[in-house]
Image (tube, rainbow, N blue to C red):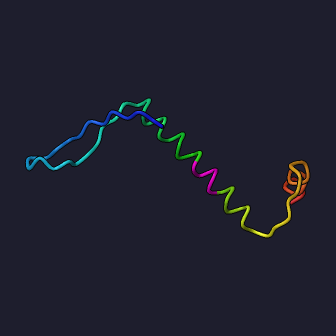
Amino acid sequence: MLALHPQYIIDDTQTQQAVVIKINEWQGIMKQLELLDDIEAYDKAKKTNNKSISFDQAVKEIRNS
């Protein structure tokens, strides 16, 4: 779990309007989002009934197209 230390920017009515976080925390968030995207793509691919091909075969097909 990422440790976040947000700071909030508030308006005149004390309503939170924005969040400021350290750059290393932002980078951690972005890495986690990329991992979630990969998991989602994997799950979606597993639900299809398409046959699998090897990496080498995929490269050959891409080069021949």
Q: Nearer the viewer, residue 30 or 59?
A: 30
Which one is in front, 30 or 59? Answer: 30
* Residue beneath the point at 64% across and 50% down: 38
Give residue 27's position: percent from left, percent from top: 48, 35
**Corner quadrant of residue 22:** top left
Q: Magenta span covers which residues?
A: 36-40
Residue lying farthest bottom?
A: 49
Name the side, left or right, on which 22 lies relative to 55. left
Residue that appears at 47% across and 40% down: 29
Taking 3 as reference, is 47 left or right?
right
From what the image shows, is residue 29 above or below residue 62? above
At 8% from the left and 47% from the top, the residue drawn is 12
Whether residue 29 is in magenta: the answer is no
Question: Does the magenta stretch mainly form a helix, a strand or a loop?
Answer: helix
Image quadrant of residue 52? bottom right
Which residue extends farthest front?
1
Q: Position of residue 14 (x, y in %)?
A: 11, 47
In the picture provided, is 53 more to the left or to the right than 49?
right
Along the line of sight, the residue nearer the viewer: 57 or 39? 39
The C terminus lies in quadrant: bottom right
The answer to if 38 sits in the magenta stretch is yes
The total of numbered circles placed on residues is 0
Residue 41 on image: x %, y %? 65, 57
* Residue at 67% from the left image edge and 63% from the top image edge: 44
